[in-house]
Image (cartoon, rainbow, N blue to C red):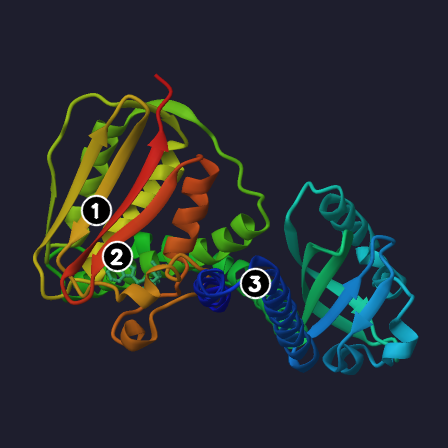
Amino acid sequence: MAIQHNESDILEKEINNLIAEGPVSKTIEQLKNRLLNQHKNAESRFRKIFDQSRFGNKIIDADLCIIQVNTALEALLGYTAKELIGTRIIDIAHPDFIKDWKELQSGLWSQKHDSFSIDTCLLKKNKEILWCRVTSIIFEDKGHSYGYTILEDISDRKNLERIRAEVDAKKDEFISIVSHELKTPLTTIKAINQLLQKAVSKDQTYYSFIQKSNHHILRLEKLIADLLDVNNITEGSVALNPSVFDMDFMLQECISGIQAIHPTHEIYYHPVGITKITADQFRIEQVIINLVNNAVKYSPSAEQVEVKLISTTTAIRIEVKDGGIGIAKKNVNKIFDRYYRIKDTSHHFQGLGLGLYIASRIIEKHHGTIGVDSEFGKGSTFWFTLPQNK
Ligand code: ADP
């Protein structure tokens, strides 16, 4: 764009000079030559970009027939220019993707879109699959319309995504089996521990041991529950059980429960009065417990965690603020991903990287939003909103 702008500036200057210098016919002749040269320059620049691009390039006419290809496209597809010219790209589209191509091409040529970009599949001459990102535009030249398409090979990325999805599926299957297997013996251990606790009096030395083992049983239970939950949530099989409840009262109850197990921190919540909401109380409690537990866990040198409830006419917003380790900007978008833990800090804190993933899916299911405002080294405010139907 910048080059064109400069050239038209120069051209305007030259026209003014020519008009000032001589007769109009000479001026027009010189102007014509100048324009022709400019057109040739633009054409040769385009040709250079078209031919030498590392992406596959092709031009098609209004009948969708290929009329020009560059060497990168020949290399990508394994066909020569001679074999490609006169054919249509749809002839070598992967059968599963022909429909996408048809829809997009008709959208483009009927001027519904100025351009389109899709990830799609073509079949190479040797019948191998080529995953490519295709970007197309329509342009006019000498009164005719043409389609200009750039094809970028994305096979490596697609293969990686496929492998990742396969590994994740295997991991999920393994986790599901293991967590089911762990659940049954743990229930027995828990029951025996409760019996022992009843049998031993509080002043006996063993009482504190039993309490400790109880604490670890609860932790194990929470881990197994998260593992089972993550599978259900990923498969989308978590159904909500909505009811009307008072969020303010729920927060008071919930926070006093969490406070009892975290004597290291003061967890503040200032009640705001009855705030009725329709949601799955158990699931929302699960989100709050998760965020507050994280706030405590990731702020070992701070002493306070503050929970706020803000109510507007259309939504409620809950904030959990800590003065802990904070989150670097580059990690903020990833922490809600499944199994994601921040590498630099994960070895200092125990966890599976599932809590925020589960929380985000629960909030999504309620048509709410979840997020975090954080400053690395200073602390974080995790928040979520829920729509309020008054
Ligand atoms: P877990 O705590 O089990 O690792 P989560 O899904 O709850 O899993 O959190 C994902 C990651 O987000 C954590 O590993 C941690 O790096 C980061 N994180 C979560 N909460 C906080 C917080 N309050 N302060 C700083 N980092 C946090």
Could one spot residue 198 in this view of the protein?
Answer: no
- Establish if 258 lies above or below 270: below
Labelled pair 2, 1 in contact (Cβ < 8 Å): yes
Residue drawn where x is 74% and y is 49% of the image: 104
Q: Position of residue 161 (x, y in %)?
A: 61, 69
Instruction: Name the foreground residue: 237 vs 307.
Output: 307
Mark 3 — residue? 27
Q: Is mark 3 within 8 Å of ligand 1?
A: no
What amino acid type should be assigned to the residue bearing mark 2? Asn
Viewer-nearest of labels 2 and 1? 1
Judged from this view, the residue extending furthest toward the top is 390
Mark 1 neighbour density, 10 Å: few (under 14) some (14–19) many (20 or more): many
Residue of label 2: 294
Residue named by callout 1 = 320
Mark 2 lies within 8 Å of ligand 1 (Cβ measured): yes
Compare marks 2 and 1 and give the one earlier in the sequence: 2
How far apart are the alpha carbons under marks 2 and 1?
A: 10 Å
Q: Which tag is nearer the camera, tag 1 or tag 3?
A: 3
Q: Residue at x 20, y 34 (%)?
A: 309
Where disc 1 sits, the SS reads strand
Question: Which element type, helix, strand or loop, lies under badge 3?
Answer: helix
- Give the x, y percent position of residue 222: 37, 55
Coordinates of residue 73 in the picture (x, y in percent): 76, 76
Picture quadrant of residue 16: bottom left
Question: Within 8 Å of ligand 1, the CB of disc 1?
Answer: yes
Q: CA distance from mark 3 to mark 2?
A: 77 Å
Labels 1 & 3 near each other (Cβ < 8 A): no
In the image, what residue type sits under mark 3?
Answer: Thr
